[in-house]
Each structure stands twice: as structure tokens, then as C-alpha cells.
Amino acid sequence: MNIWLTLHLIGVVLFIGNIITAAFWKVRADLTKDPTVIYGTVKNVMLADYVFTLPGIALIIVSGFAMAATAEWPMSGLNWLTLSLILFAFTGIIWLAILIPLQRGMIRQIAQCIESGTISKAYQQASRNWAVFGIAATLLPIVILYLMVTKSF
């Protein structure tokens, strides 16, 4: 297996693995209804994005473009590669423009809830929005993974 493919697979595992496990731990924390537990989890989800998701994205982009150039895959017209790139960019936009600001807001909102011991409506709304956009930002990479494996068109 060549180095670019190896780096690409490591990036995919870091990226998809982290977005799925982050959602799992966030949902589990929310089910406790304990603001202290939720606060720690949401902060760690944010940290995990920087430690795992960002390096995964970097590996995916660098190795993906290197493999495409080496294999001389077409980077124009609509094909599995260009559709994957479009979906990957859309995932990035969701993450940067919506999910990261929501996570920062959830950290602030749940921190305010620790003293009272109750979950605020503002946190609940931000958490619901995070779940909706997080589902989209998780399903799109799974579609991309399918396109990358099958190279169907």
C-alpha cells in the first residue's frame, strides 16, 4: 500500500471516528441531565475536534490531492471525485460556520447552568441544533466514503 493511501486511511479513521464518537459521548452526557457532566463532555468534544478531526481533515486533503494527481484522476466535470470534494467542502462549511459556534455557545450556556443544577432552554435549543447539523455533517462523510470506495461514476 502506498504512503498516500495509508495517510488517507488514517485521516478518514481520525475524521469519521471522532465525529461519531463525539456525538455518542455528547448524547450520553445530555441524558444524565447533569450540567457538570455535560460541561466536561462538551469541552472535551471541542478539544477532540482540534486533536483528531482537524489532523484527520489535513491528512485527507493532502493525501487525497496527492493520490488524485498521481493517478491523474479528472478534477473537472461531475464524477465520484468532484462530487466527493463538493460534499467534503459542504461538510467543512457546516462544521466551521455552524457546529463550532454552536459548541462554543453550548459550553458558555451549560457553564451558567452548573450553579442552578438545571439545564437552560438556551442550552437545550443549541443542543438540538447541534444534533441536527451534526447528523448532516456525519452523514455527508459517510456518503463520501461510499463514493471513494465504489468510485461508481
Image (cartoon, grey):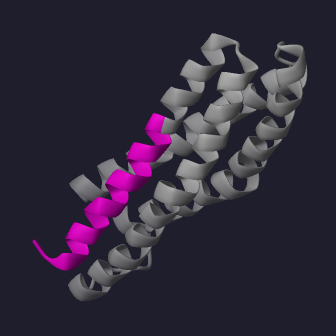
Residue at 69% across / 35% down in the picture? 130
Residue at 65% across / 24% down in the picture? 37
Most foreground residue, 107 or 66: 107
Q: Give the residues in magenta.
A: 1-21
Queried whether the magenta region covers residue 5, the answer comes back as yes
Most foreground residue, 50 or 75: 50
Query: Residue 111, percent across and down?
Result: 83, 32
Q: Is residue 69 left or right of residue 47?
A: left
**Quadrant including the C terminus:** bottom left
Residue 128 in sight here: yes
Seen in the picture, residue 81 relative to 122 is either above or below; the reply is below
Residue at far front of view = 115
Query: Residue 39, percent across and down?
Result: 71, 31
**Quadrant including the N terminus:** bottom left
Residue at 53% across / 33% down in the picture? 23
Seen in the picture, residue 125 relative to 73 is either above or below; the reply is above
Queried whether the magenta region covers residue 15, the answer comes back as yes
Residue 152 in sight here: no
Q: Is residue 75 left or right of residue 103?
A: left
Residue at far left of view = 1
Query: Residue 146, percent across and down?
Result: 31, 48
Residue at 27% across / 79% down in the picture? 67
Q: Kindly indicate the quadrant of the structure image that contains residue 21.
A: top left
Question: Mostly what secondary structure, the magenta segment?
Answer: helix
